[in-house]
Amino acid sequence: MTLSRRSLPFAAAVAACLVALVAPPARADVVVLLPPAGNADDLRREDFEEALTATLRAAGHTLVAGDAIRRGALVGDPRTADELTALAEGNGAAWTLVSEVHPLQGQYRLLLRAGYARVRRVEELDVLVVHADQEARLRDILACLVRPAGLGEDALRLTGGEDAAAAEQREREARAQADLEQAEREQAAREQAEREQAAQAQAEAEAARARAEFERREAERAQAERDRLAAAFEARARYADDAEHPWLAQLSLGGAGLMAYPDPPGPSPGGGFLGQFGVRVGYGLPGLLRGLEARGGIEAVFGVASALELFVGAAYLTSPFAFPLHLGGSLEVGGFFNTSGAREPGLLVRAAAVASYRLTPRLAVELALPTLSVISSAGGLVSLGGAARIGYQF
């Protein structure tokens, strides 16, 4: 059987592999391993350096790497045979290995330069490494590159040759796998986004329901408070509205500044002080007008004049608050009888603003302020003051 020209490289590769399996392994050597260069990022280069280190050590080589490398006068990476040899000899090694990594889709381009110091030989390889097949690929490349015999015919196989179709197939498979993984990642991302959107929509719906429930409870609470206040206001105590106790008895103490009409001047030109102390009686008239009370009483007057006041009148007080504070006014008409001086009787007219606060259901205090009184005796007098009263409902 004869071999075609095309099958010769493949036969040589098979023979090389059989020799490698049958022949005893070569003695491992010391290798100076320089940090990888290339346009890959730091993380990719670190991953590749770890894989390269693990493969060389698995093959039994001793490594000089990192800060342990003694560079001597060398600056940068060695390129010539002299530089590679000098670096190896300066570190007591047989090999110097320089690498570059350039990432591609699903694979990377690997440039390797190996200098064998014992024969001053430099060999280079420019190969493609698929990520999914990295471990086996690096083991194959380094086994052929870092050996005393050199690359030989394996260079054709490693850089393409008969395996170009297989490499292309692997590349296609790698691209397909990468596309599948990308599609799966995109699908997972879409599903995750949909889940997050659904969760966000659910959270927003729950927040809206909680907000609506809170607003409903607040509205109900506010309405209940308004209803309570309205009920309390409607049920408030109103002035002079107790049918069982329509009568009111009051003790009153007051005072006023007295001013004389200028013509005639009266008994005390320039003014003076009048005090009043007396009793009053009232009777509620809610049937006529709620808050209306008929009043009458007698008061003793002291100060710049001594007199008695007899009067009748009415008070009207509204109940604008839920608590028992009543506001209104009073009007009284009566006689003013001097008990000193000329003892001339006169007409009394008195109007006042009145505020009443109920201490208990039947006991109340009252303030009449201001109180304006007009007296016709002694040529006509006007007094302005106030009074405090305490009353009992019966």
Image: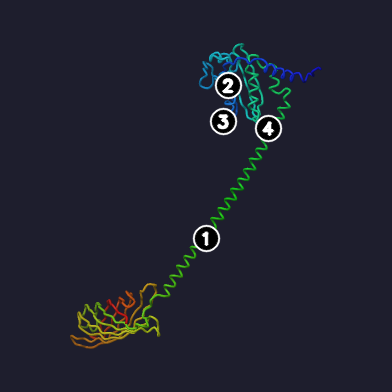
User: Can the viewer see residue 355?
Assistant: no
SS assignment at label 4: helix
Compute the Cα span from label 2 to label 4. Answer: 28 Å
Name the residue beneath numbered marker 2: 57
Which residue is at a point 62% across and 28% down the rendered structure image?
Answer: 102
- Upstream in sequence: badge 4 or badge 1: 4
Compute the Cα span from label 4 to label 3. Answer: 21 Å
Which residue is at a point 58% across and 50% down the rendered structure image?
Answer: 199
Q: Which of the numbered marks, if any, corresponds to residue 287? A: none
Choose top left, top right, bottom left or bottom right for residue 177: top right
- Upstream in sequence: badge 2 or badge 1: 2
Q: Amino acid at mark 2?
A: Arg
Name the residue beneath numbered marker 1: 213
Q: Quadrant of the C terminus?
A: bottom left
- Upstream in sequence: badge 2 or badge 3: 3
* Classed neighbour count for the residue bearing mark 4: other residues with Cα under 10 Å, few (<14), some (14–19), many (≥20): some
Q: Amino acid at mark 1?
A: Glu
For the residue pair 46 and 21, the one nearer the viewer reads as 21
SS assignment at label 3: helix
Name the residue beneath numbered marker 4: 174
Compute the Cα span from label 4 to label 1. Answer: 57 Å
State the image coordinates of residue 209 (x, y, percent, origin top left): 54, 58
Q: Which of the numbered marks, if any, corresponds to residue 43? A: 3
State the image coordinates of residue 298 (x, y, percent, origin top left): 26, 84
